[in-house]
Image: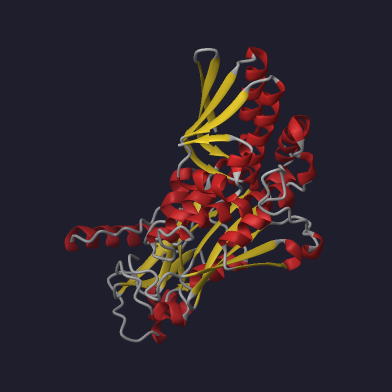
Amino acid sequence: MVGVMGPMPMTVAVYDDWLVLAVRDNCDLAPADSLAEVVTATGMPQVTGVRVDLRVAVATPATIRAVLAAEEAARRRDWRFRLNGCDTLLPLDAAAAAHDWGGGWTGIAPVRLGQPDAAGLRAGLTPPYRAFFQTAGGDMAMVGARCVEAVRRGGLAVSVATDAACALDIAQHFDHAVFSRGWRDDSEQGNLMVLCLAEAIGNAIIHGNLGMDGGLRTGRQGFERFSTLMAERLGDPARAGRRIEVSLHPHGETIRIAVRDQGDGFDDHARPDGGPSSDTMQGRGLSLMRKSARQVWYEDGGRVVVLEFAVPNQEQETAG
Amino acid sequence: MNYRMVATDGGVEVSLEGVLNFAANDDFLSMLRALSRDRPKSVIFDLSGLTGIDSVGLGLLYIAHEDIAGMGAALTLSSARDSVARLLDLTEAHKTFRVIA
């Protein structure tokens, strides 16, 4: 079973043997765009064992909504994926599509799009959704390829601007999603994950996208300067608009969580590591990450930190 | 992060709520300024309302410790839970702060 996300302003996918067409509110499909043409364009006829609802004869947004609404009423089905123009669907890759994620979703992953707030972020990380992407008008161009790939492989992802990342507690929401899907347990080690994520995200924001020197945070005067400079940099649209992206990639008996920024990067080998010291006020971040994760490494010139954790058991996600 | 200050017998109890991280600078520094004005004899930070913390937030606690010690007062960290308690343990905060359950 596959779904297809094409360049057209709509998404075609398979849900419980029904063809689902998700149409953005601003899409402008001509009445002549028949379902058959859409199916041909997206390659859906190659999918076997899928029953296409040919009653959706003309694929205008209004028609699709009306048909799905009628189906929902008639079949008493909870169409949890609302075609409200704030969501999209991504196809899972072959390996992920073969996995039973539960919840009745086959081969596709719903993604929440829109302006960032806590409710949207929480919803985007709650089944059946697998991601929250901050977008303007559903434009996925600003979302990094690593996030899309994570979702297609059955993982999770968040992509938001820096100013939004400062206002949202991404680490807590992401950690909760990882726990609820069985990728971490309630052990002492498992509970360190949220600390690890908080460090990685904080570093990406402060040192990555805002380009601030951690050495400022020495003593009260240093923190006063740090606070002032942080406010100034968040007031710069170019910096505040840089992306913070968190993506989870299932990888055998481990998960890999990547935190990506759009800063200048750094030389990993020159990075100071103060260790979990009780007498220094900085330099603990990397040490905490290394204490929590099985492995930590950097990619893309220091713009991506990858945290690898062991999965408690191989069943992984079953709650879907 | 939000905070609430309550005067006690010669001291102050400060309840911290929310997430103590890089985004909490302004509120935390505002609280420290208020403490500097009042110059209490003892300060208790009630951390039971904190849901998260990072190393920047931990650094803020160390700065508070320095400030309060400079006033001749003592800082006690109280009722940390979950990830906040774990971070305090990992970083051996008890060597610097008085930590109570």
Q: How many marks?
A: 0
Residue in front for this viewpoint, B77 or A85:
B77
Can residue A34 be seen from the camera position used here? Answer: no
* Residue at (78, 58) in percent of width and height: A271
Between A110 and B24, the one nearer to me in the picture: B24
Q: Answer above or below: position of B42 versus B47.
A: above
Would residue A306 be found to the left or right of residue A155 on screen?
right
Residue in front for this viewpoint, A198 or A11:
A198
Which of the 4 image quarters holds residue A45?
Answer: bottom left
Does residue A241 lie above or below A108 as drawn?
above
Residue B97 locus on image (x, y percent): 60, 35
Residue plotted at (70% across, 47% down): A206
Q: Quadrant of residue A65?
A: bottom left
Q: Position of residue A81 (x, y in %)?
A: 35, 59
- Residue at the front extreme of this rendering: B95
Q: Measured from the top left, where is residue A184 in percent x and y?
A: 44, 63
Could one spot residue B14 in this view of the protein?
A: yes
